[in-house]
Amino acid sequence: MISVCNDSHSDFILLGFSDKPYLEKALFWVILIFYCLMISGNMTIIFVSWKDPKLQIPMYFFLSNLSLLDLCFTSSCVPQMLGNFWGPEKTISYIGCTIQLCVFMWLGATECVLLVMMAIDRYVAVCHALQYTSIMHPQICVNLAILAWATGLFQSLIQAPATLQLPFCSHWTVDDILCEVPALIQISSADTTYNEIQMSIASFILLVAPLIIILSSYGAIVRAVLRIKSTAGQKKAFSTCTSHFLVVSLFYGTVTGVYLQPRNHYSYEWGKFLTLFYTVVTPTLNPLIYTLRNKEVKGALMRLGKRTWDFQNS
């Protein structure tokens, strides 16, 4: 039975790394640098994909969605995180925590689904190359992107209210760097069995099942590539997929560490670093991974730079 508290909604205290103030000062500057790089990198990907005619294909449509998602995802938590790391004030209002939780869950779930859409796109491109343009029709790509964003929103509208309805009573100190479901469940004064079951089901649907689909897609891609007799053809096919697979590995490798590992003090301590990784580091690395390993994106950047240079000189 859920206990009833007479406390009005108070401010939450996000402990972060308050027991290591020297670490927080260092993390402030590291996160600030990564955040600036993340903004510039993802905005560049969006702009180039939009402006360059050669990038008007499904792969870069989904990549632009991923960049927009990363911009919003990281911005939903990093400004508050920087404020907490810089000074002694580590509070976040109940309304602020509610907004952060809802947006964070929405965008995080959307990314899980969007990475599946990107894997399917690569599967069709390699395994059904002759039918690629008809299968991955622009309208179908738009519908898949809408499905990804809508699925994330639906998940947030289900799990966020269930978490926020828990009574916290006098326990408003969250042992985390942001308002996440596992940390909020941990401080509730009520029986959280239902919430934990709900989180486990959501984790399976949005983490385990998508990962199985992605790995299955890449298994089929590897088998198809190995049947290609030309070494150059094999190299080209692998090059179009390795960037996405690396992004998937970085994202899922850290998110599953937070949402699927057993709950104890050790896991929460390391969970903070994992949260930092998938909220700050991975969104920053994504544009670099796609540009450094992708000749088409590098070519588009060079063409954009040349047009900008010619326009300024004229």
Image (cartoon, rainbow, N blue to C red):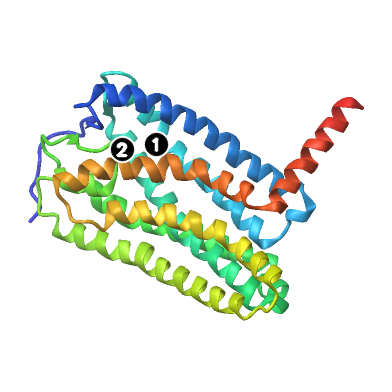
> Residue at 77% across / 41% down in the picture?
302
Residue toward you, 266 or 87: 266
Front residue of 134 and 223 = 223
Left/right placement of residue 195 relative to residue 149 reads left
Q: Which quadrant of the rendered structure holds the N terminus?
A: bottom left
Asked which secondary structure carries label 1, the reply is: loop
- In the rendered image, residue 286, in percent from the top left (x then y), is placed at 53, 47
- Numbered disc 2: secondary structure: loop
Quarter occupied by residue 132: bottom right
Note whether 275 is above or below 144 in the view shown: above
- Residue 197: % across, % down: 20, 63
| Image spot of residue 251 (x, y percent) | 42, 53
- The quarter of the displayed image where residue 74 is located: top left
Residue located beneath label 2 in the image: 178
Q: Which mark is residue 77?
A: 1
Residue sitting at the far bottom: 227
Q: CA distance from mark 2 to mark 1?
A: 7 Å
Lower sequence index among marks 2 and 1: 1
Q: Are marks 2 and 1 in contact (CB under 8 Å)?
A: yes
Task: Specify the label residue 307 is tagged with.
Answer: none
